């Protein structure tokens, strides 16, 4: 049985919730070890998402298979079970891991965006987990636009120079000015302590401020695939890329592949 202290928010209405203290000391130790090991040995997919004159904002992707602590967290923590609970899925697969670290003084904001348009999957039963291993005050925490998980898709752009490298210019809607109409676009955010996490749908618009003071903001994000998620090949390189997958999975096929291991299956399906 899923042991959650409390869920704040409404998943179906808002497309995002805060899960309080579902991750215990052992889980958090693995998450911190995974992040630190990743920072010490970045993969070829790693990128710096802040300017040269700013403090480092470092991202990396798809490292579960080479960092033991990352794989243990993905397989042993309650994260996949929480994703199943929220999405109502009987089976959860890993999509990918994503490490995000903003060092003290990073001014760079994570721009408003949806994750879904960058991806090579489609479906509605999915969840992203945003788990900080450092305390995150409200003013530097992840921010989400409630209700955007129902669509539409907005044009994805690169974070630093706002280039449309995925869908062509004009093929999807541009992001609205969320700040100009706060009543129409209510924002969600939570102050977080280690053990707290935010879960949100791949389509939920989100972003995050820079960090101030002397604190770091190290985050382990894991993306989960529920029952209706299928392969959706793109004619461009997705973020993250999965080279060669188009030759192994047909369009519309379930994501049954060693790259996306099954993490959870309900007892009714066993």
Image (cartoon, rainbow, N blue to C red):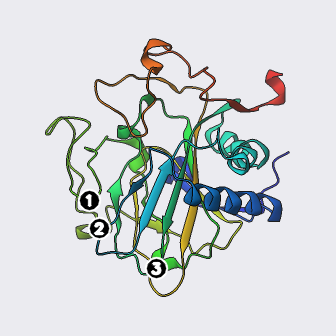
User: Foreground mark, 2 or 3?
Assistant: 2
- x, y percent for residue 27: 77, 58
The answer to which quarter of the image holds residue 91 is: top right
**Location of mark 2 (residue):** 51
Q: Which mark is residue 160?
A: 1
CA separation, marks 1 and 2?
8 Å
In the shown orientation, is residue 155 left or right of residue 194? left
Q: Are the residues tagged 1 and 3 within 8 Å (C-beta)?
A: no
Packing grade of label 2 (10 A; few <14, some 14-19, many >=20) is few
When the figure is inspected, residue 245 is found, relative to residue 108, above or below; the finding is: above
Q: Indicate which disc, 2 or 3, sits on the residue closer to the N terminus.
A: 2
| Badge 1 element | loop
When the figure is inspected, residue 149 is found, relative to residue 110, above or below; the finding is: above
From the image, which quarter does the C terminus lie in? top right
Q: Which mark is residue 139?
A: 3
Residue that appears at 81% across and 48% down: 2
Q: Are the residues tagged 2 and 3 within 8 Å (C-beta)?
A: no
In the shown orientation, is residue 139 left or right of residue 164? right
Residue that appears at 47% across and 66% down: 188
């Amino acid at each position: 049985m899923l042991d959650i202290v409390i869920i704040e928010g409404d998943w179906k209405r808002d497309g995002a919730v805060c899960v309080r203290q579902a991750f215990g000391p052992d889980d958090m130790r693995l998450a911190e070890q995974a992040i630190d090991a990743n920072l010490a040995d970045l993969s070829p997919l790693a990128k710096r998402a802040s300017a040269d004159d700013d403090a480092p904002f470092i991202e990396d992707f798809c490292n579960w298979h080479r960092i033991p602590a990352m794989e243990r967290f993905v397989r042993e923590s309650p994260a996949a079970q929480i994703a199943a609970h929220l999405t109502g899925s009987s089976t959860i697969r890993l999509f990918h891991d994503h490490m995000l670290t903003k060092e003290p003084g990073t001014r760079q904001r994570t721009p408003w965006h949806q994750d879904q348009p960058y991806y090579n999957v489609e479906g509605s039963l999915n969840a992203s987990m945003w788990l900080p291993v450092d305390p995150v005050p409200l003013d530097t925490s992840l921010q989400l636009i409630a209700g955007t998980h129902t669509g539409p898709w907005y044009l994805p752009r690169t974070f630093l120079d706002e280039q449309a490298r995925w869908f062509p210019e004009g093929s999807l809607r541009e992001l609205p000015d969320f700040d100009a109409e706060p009543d129409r676009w209510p924002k969600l955010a939570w102050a977080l302590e280690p053990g707290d996490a935010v879960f949100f749908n791949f389509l939920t618009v989100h972003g995050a401020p820079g960090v101030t003071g002397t604190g770091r903001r190290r985050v382990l994000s894991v993306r989960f695939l529920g029952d209706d998620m299928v392969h959706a090949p793109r004619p461009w390189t997705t973020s993250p890329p999965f080279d060669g997958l188009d030759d192994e999975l047909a369009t519309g096929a379930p994501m049954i592949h060693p790259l996306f291991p099954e993490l959870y299956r309900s007892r009714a399906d066993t």
